[in-house]
C-alpha cells in the first residue's frame, strides 16, 4: 500500500497542496469526502459532523458518554438521545479511511489520519505549516474576512485541532518528530510544497 497523510495548520493551504499531490500522483484524495461518508454512515447531517469534527468535548459531554454505558437513572435522560460519541465518530472515520486504503494509493487530509496510521510502515506523513502572519493573510484572502476575524479563526481552529489530537491520541500535533516531512507553504508556495511532497512520495514508495 502507499498512504500519504497531510496534516496542516489552518490557513497553511494544506488541503490545496494535498489536492495537487493527489492529482499529480494519480492517487485517490480523501478530504471533505470523508465528512460526507461519516455523515451517511452515522445517520447525521454533514453540518453536524463538520461542527463536531476536531472539536474537544466538554466535561459534561464526556461524563454523559461514559455514563451512557451504565444504568444510572440520572444520566438516562441525556443518554436517551443516543447521540453518537466522538469515539464512535473517530472509529467510523477510521473504517472509511481503511476502506479507501484497500482500494489503492491514497492521500488523506487531516481527520486524525496521521495519528490513526502512525504505526503503519506503508505511509508518508506530511505536515504543512506557515508563520502565523502568513496563516492570517491566506485566511483573509480565502474567507474574505478582516485581519482580526482571520486571526481569531486561525488561532481558535488550530487550538481546537491541537486539543483534539492531544485528547484522543495523546500526541502533539505540531511536533515535527511525528512527521516524515514538514513543509513551509509560505516559503515554498502551494505548488512548490506540492512538488516537494511528490518528489518525497516517489522516492519513499519507489515510483518512477
Image (cartoon, rainbow, N blue to C red):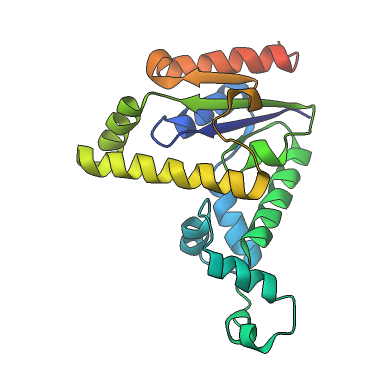
Residue 66 visible (yes or no): yes
144 relative position to 8: left or right:
left
Q: Along the line of sight, which residue is nearer the eye, 194 or 27?
A: 194
Position of 80 relative to 127 (above/below): below
Q: Quadrant of residue 88?
A: bottom right
Residue 53 percent across, percent down from the top left: 53, 54
Query: Which residue is painted at 56% across and 55% down in the image?
Result: 36
Query: Which residue is painted at 60% across and 66% down in the image?
Result: 62
Residue 200 percent across, percent down from the top left: 63, 14
Query: Which residue is painted at 45% across and 43% down in the image?
Result: 159
State the residue lying farthest toward the left: 146
Q: Quadrant of residue 64?
A: bottom right
The quarter of the picture where the N terminus appears is top right
75 relative position to 187: left or right:
right
Query: Which residue is painted at 37% across and 40% down in the image?
Result: 155
Residue 145 visible (yes or no): no
Residue 44 percent across, percent down from the top left: 56, 67
Residue 17 percent across, percent down from the top left: 48, 27
Q: Along the line of sight, which residue is nearer the eye, 87 or 1?
A: 87
State the residue lying farthest toward the bottom: 73
Position of 165 relative to 68 (above/below): above
Numbered circles on residues, count: 0
The quarter of the picture where the C terminus appears is top right
Amino acid at each position: 500500500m502507499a498512504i500519504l497523510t497531510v496534516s496542516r495548520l489552518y490557513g497553511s493551504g494544506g488541503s490545496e497542496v494535498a489536492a495537487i499531490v493527489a492529482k499529480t500522483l494519480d492517487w485517490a484524495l480523501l478530504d471533505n469526502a470523508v465528512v460526507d461518508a461519516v455523515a451517511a454512515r452515522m445517520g447525521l447531517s454533514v453540518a453536524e459532523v463538520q461542527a463536531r469534527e476536531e472539536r474537544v468535548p466538554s466535561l459534561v459531554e464526556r461524563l454523559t458518554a461514559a455514563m451512557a454505558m451504565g444504568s444510572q437513572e440520572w444520566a438516562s435522560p441525556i443518554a436517551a438521545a443516543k447521540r453518537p460519541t466522538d469515539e464512535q465518530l473517530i472509529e467510523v472515520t477510521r473504517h472509511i479511511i481503511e476502506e479507501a486504503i484497500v482500494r489503492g494509493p491514497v492521500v488523506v487530509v487531516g481527520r486524525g489520519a496521521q495519528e490513526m496510521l502512525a504505526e503503519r510502515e506503508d505511509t508518508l506523513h506530511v505536515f504543512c505549516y506557515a508563520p502565523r502572519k502568513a496563516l492570517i493573510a491566506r485566511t483573509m484572502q480565502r474567507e474574505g474576512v478582516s485581519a482580526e476575524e482571520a486571526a481569531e479563526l486561525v488561532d481558535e481552529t488550530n487550538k481546537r485541532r491541537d486539543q483534539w489530537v492531544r485528547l484522543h491520541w495523546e500526541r502533539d500535533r505540531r511536533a515535527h518528530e511525528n512527521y516524515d516531512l514538514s513543509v513551509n507553504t509560505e516559503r515554498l508556495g502551494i505548488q512548490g510544497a506540492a512538488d516537494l511532497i511528490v518528489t518525497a512520495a516517489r522516492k519513499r514508495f519507489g515510483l518512477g
